[in-house]
Amino acid sequence: MILDLVDEMVAEGVSVVAATKVIGVSARCVERWRRQQGGEDQRRGPKSEPANKLSVKEREHVLSVANSAEYRDLAPKQIVPKLADVGTYLASESSFYRYLREEGQLSHRGKSRPPSQKPAEHAATGPCQVWSWDITYLRSALRGCFYYLYLIVDIWSRRIVGWTVEECESTDLAAMLFRRTCAQLGIDPDGLVLHSDNGGPMKGSTMLATLQRLGVVASFSRPHVSDDNPYSESLFRTMKYRPGFPSKPFTSVDEARQWVAGFVTWYNTEHLHSAIGFVAPDDRHSGRDFLILEHRQAVYERARSQHPERWSGETRSWSHPNEVILNPQSDRPAVAMKEAA
């Protein structure tokens, strides 16, 4: 009967793979049946369910947590560490992803191809060693006019260390922001690396003179290659794809500044960044991340001791990234990982 149905669909122009998928068998299985000229279905399948499989009730609980008001805007890789922070383990990230995928609640995001060559690399092993900065547009109520967000991020901690929203792009404003940021943090910028793209404010005479006078090492992307400045570009994408990003233009520069101030507070203190062990940038910048990662490791060890049958090996390692590379060369990784002390 199955072979007749497949033949009927193929005669109507449906491919064999698509026809067998609708029926619920594989194309290879149908081919084998044809060679055997029909007969009985000799597929056996698994004789028992995996011992570490979550129960239906546990699966429903995982889905309810993932769709709760607190976690529904977060990916499983953000949900799992947040649960660990409050002493809760429900399932692994892969289980969260699998259950959400089965419910049609995941979407695919493609990968972008990196450029073939990169500018000189710079390594950061602590805060205030390598900064990245850029400018992005914020829509104003007047069509064709924009407000400009100047933003500086520390690539080691991913903390936003300086920002301002202005009504124009200016190398003088950029230089002023850099000097003010250094003063607020109380640091000597001599030897600090400041990376940016090749825009006018970045390479303007006032900005370059300021950097040279302070002993700052200026680093620039290749022209028209946004991947050379990944930390700032990624940060802007996080900002503009946040659920709370305004769908309507800002009515004034003060309104734009107020919204950005709220975003910076959230990003620095609440956002769990995937590249730094899923801790908040402020926690990493201040060194509090070590205790957070140790606590998560203890939660996982306790979960494994309660249900050892669900673990085939070691628990997830909540590692502490101890080095971040700006524009790494092809012969070394972008982030060197080290176990949390």
Image: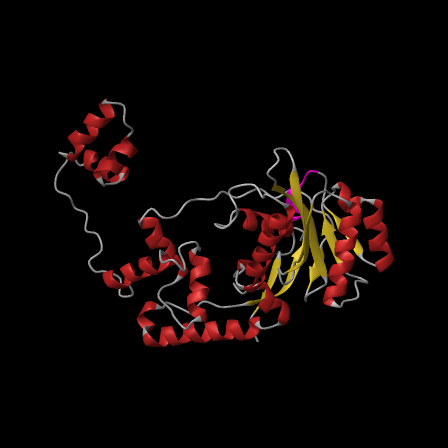
Q: Residue furthest top?
A: 12
The verdict on residue 225 being magenta is: yes
Q: Position of residue 179 (x, y in %)?
A: 78, 58
Q: Position of residue 231 (x, y in %)?
A: 63, 52
Q: In the picture provided, is 270 more to the left or to the right than 311?
A: right
Q: Split into 4 quadrants, where in the image is the C terminus?
A: bottom right
Q: In the picture provided, is 293 more to the left or to the right than 179?
A: left
Q: Position of residue 325 (x, y in %)?
A: 66, 57
Q: Nearer the viewer, residue 222 or 120?
A: 222
Determine whether 1 is above or below 239 in the image. above
Determine whether 336 is above or below 36 in the image. below
Q: Is residue 315 visible?
A: no
Q: In the picture provided, is 74 more to the left or to the right than 59?
A: right
Total number of numbered labels?
Answer: 0
State the extent of the magenta-drawn residues as a range.
224-229
Q: Is residue 228 visible?
A: yes
Looking at the image, which residue is at 19% across and 37% down? 33
Looking at the image, which residue is at 69% across and 51% down? 133
Applied colour scheme: secondary structure
Q: Position of residue 282 (x, y in %)?
A: 60, 66
Q: Quadrant of residue 152?
A: bottom right
Q: Split into 4 quadrants, where in the image is the N terminus?
A: top left
The verdict on residue 157 being magenta is: no
Q: Nearer the viewer, residue 165 or 221?
A: 165
Looking at the image, which residue is at 70% across and 60% down? 123
Looking at the image, which residue is at 52% across and 72% down? 292
Q: Nearer the viewer, residue 131 or 50?
A: 131
